[in-house]
Amino acid sequence: MYLIIYICSSLFTLCFVEMVDGVNVGHWNIDISPKTVDMVPFNGRLITVREHTKQKGRYFFSPLAYLMKSTADVPDFFNITKYPIMTFDVRMWSDDLQQKVFSHLKRRVNESVEKNNVRLLPMEKVRIRWNHGNITGDYRVIETWKTNTLNSKSIQFEIECTTIRACKNLKDKMKSYPQTFDYLEIEYSLFAQKSSRRVLTVTGRHIVEGKLYAKLANMRTSSVYLNSDDVNRFAKESTTSVIASVVRDATYVSESDELSLVRAIKEVIKQDIVNTQNFQPKMWESVYWQDQWARPDKVTHHYNKLYRQDKNDSNCLIVNDEYVKDDYDGHLSGDAFVASLSLSGRYAQIDSPKSSVQDINSYLDESNLQTEFTGLNFTVKPMDLFRVNLAKLVNSNNIKTENIQVKEYPIVLKVKVQVAHLPIESSTSNDNYVLKDINNQLEKPKKQMKDTEQYINEQKTNLGIQ
């Protein structure tokens, strides 16, 4: 037996049909009626209301799904989550909504209804998704299912970013122009899940579907060197691709099994470790670095040109004015080079021509630039990189095989996240908004009626009819 849910309108009107071997046998066997009792206007959205099948007088309303743009934040605990994340809340319901639905039902459906019998649809699990292809390469919407048995008024969701700056830009965008996030939607399940085990095989096809692979392929080399963060990203993108090949809207892979698959792929990628102490200069051209200007060999080269040791004080370095004026590598001046990197938050403009070795090394450490002054000159800090044979991975039919658990929710409902600037806490403002919206909708037919009346009068005059 399987369930088909048809979305009949963007305002969360749903049609439910249960099919067995292609034969319609009625609506699904649950306690909430699939029939709509009424639609309640609230903040420009029609809220669907349904009644309990067996216990008459108990009503359930659909979620608001309002984006709370003011809650957008970039927490400082990303060192635990590995990647920076931006968090934000989505309002699922409010006291005002409950009161609005209650008053509406009491006035138009059931005058004996009690307020504590008017509640949000029960949701066991909730997640957020981006429903318009892939989001841009710097971001990933975290689509993990969240437990919501308490039917919280607001739920926090996350978007993963490649850099802290990307997260901060995204936060500013959400607060200043929330329409950017118009493709977000909420999925939720009302009932318990089923599960089964699947054998997943990672192949070269899954590797090439990752966003990072596209950047690596543009380097036009059969093998590349990645740091541990990029190996993790490479493995996660491959995992996302292979999981997407077996899951449907109502199915998902648990976070623990997903992480297990990521670790398995990382083990394969991390087999060939090379320390940069053994690097030849040309080998750096095969090193992928997210910000190519901040690649350690380039930063080291730049700092060796930019600074020279103070002859009178070995603990201080002086800016080389000639280098600042000259073209860097023939196309970018030294100060422009520093300025370009400062845009990414990794470099600061040079405020003083003289700095202590300790201050410069501290700055390089804080900026995670993998460069240090060793007493004579700047050198790349020794680090382990991982050599990845792209040609071998892409042509492989079996990179890794894992047995994982695929979980399925028999019923998954969807509602679009509303991002418009609308009031949601004031009953008065809610009513005013709805009245204004209704008046706006009536303006057009009023004008049409007036035009029609004018046309009829003109025709009557032409025909001499009084």
Image: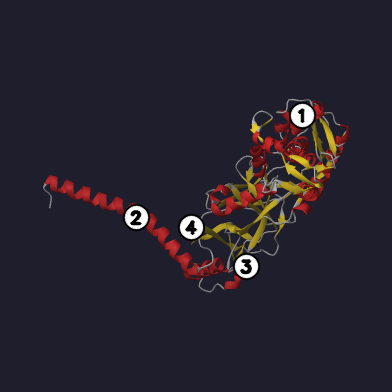
Task: Write down the quadrant of residue 440 in the picture.
Answer: bottom left
* Left or right side of 165 for 308: right
Q: CA distance from mark 3 to mark 1?
A: 70 Å
State the residue position of label 3: 55
**Where is residue 251 shown, x and y percent of the image?**
72, 46
Residue type pointed to by label 2? Glu
Q: Nearer the viewer, residue 395 or 299?
A: 299
The numbered disc on residue 315 is none
Which of marks 4 and 3 precedes in the sequence?
Answer: 4
Q: Are marks 3 and 4 in contact (CB under 8 Å)?
A: no
Task: Write down the quadrant of residue 214 in the picture.
Answer: top right
State the residue position of label 4: 44
Residue type pointed to by label 3? Gln
Q: CA distance from mark 1 to mark 4?
A: 55 Å
The numbered disc on residue 285 is 1
Q: CA distance from mark 1 to mark 2?
A: 65 Å
